[in-house]
Image (tube, rainbow, N blue to C red):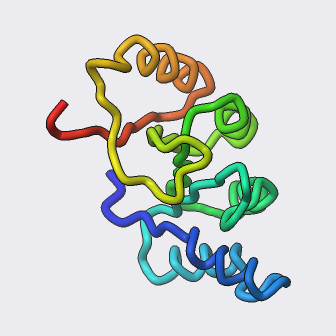
Amino acid sequence: MTKLSVNINKIATLRNARGHNNPDLVQVALDAERFGAQGITVHPRPDERHIRYNDVFALKDQVTTEFNIEGYPDKRYMEIIRLAKPAQATLVPDPPEAITSNTGWDTIQHKEMLKDLISELHSYGVRTSIFINPES
């Protein structure tokens, strides 16, 4: 079981602000692994304000620990998961226009949808986790 997965989204935000590949996102991920991280997490958003789609594929070929891709399960996200086949997909209920994740799934209200999504992700051979509301 992974005890520490490092989310590198903010590193990508810094890189994007600088306009080049500094810091090098793949190198940051490799360094995090070398320093003891047991996983790397990314959250590619449609506006690519931090992780870009091509980052996902650059990282998938280099990350040797658990690779976790989190996001809102729209068609774009599901396609990324199908193609990248990370170790884990984490479903987050933040729609594309959300600035950040601030709540979890209401598992009662979204039960059938989540069951269908998880079934699809499992068909890709990808372990699945979900952000939940502890009150639901």
Q: Position of residue 71 (x, y in %)?
A: 55, 45
Which image quarter: residue 25? bottom right
Q: Residue furthest right?
A: 20
Q: Position of residue 131 (x, y in %)?
A: 35, 42
Which residue is rendered at x = 39% and y = 38% of the image?
129
Which residue is rendered at x = 81% and y = 57% of the image?
54
Which residue is rendered at x = 75% and y = 77% of the image?
16
Q: Of residues 5 and 10, which is closer to you in this image?
A: 10
Which residue is rendered at x = 47% and y = 23% of the image?
118
Q: How many marks?
A: 0
* 80 displayed left or right of 67: right
Q: Residue furthest left?
A: 135
Q: Position of residue 119 (x, y in %)?
A: 50, 17
Q: Is residue 59 above or below residue 78?
A: below
Q: Of residues 89 and 113, which is closer to you in this image?
A: 113
Q: Position of residue 40 (x, y in %)?
A: 52, 63
Q: Quadrant of the C terminus?
A: top left
Which image quarter: residue 5? bottom left
* 75 displayed left or right of 40: right
* 117 displayed left or right of 76: left
Which image quarter: residue 75? top right
Q: Is residue 110 above or below residue 72?
A: above
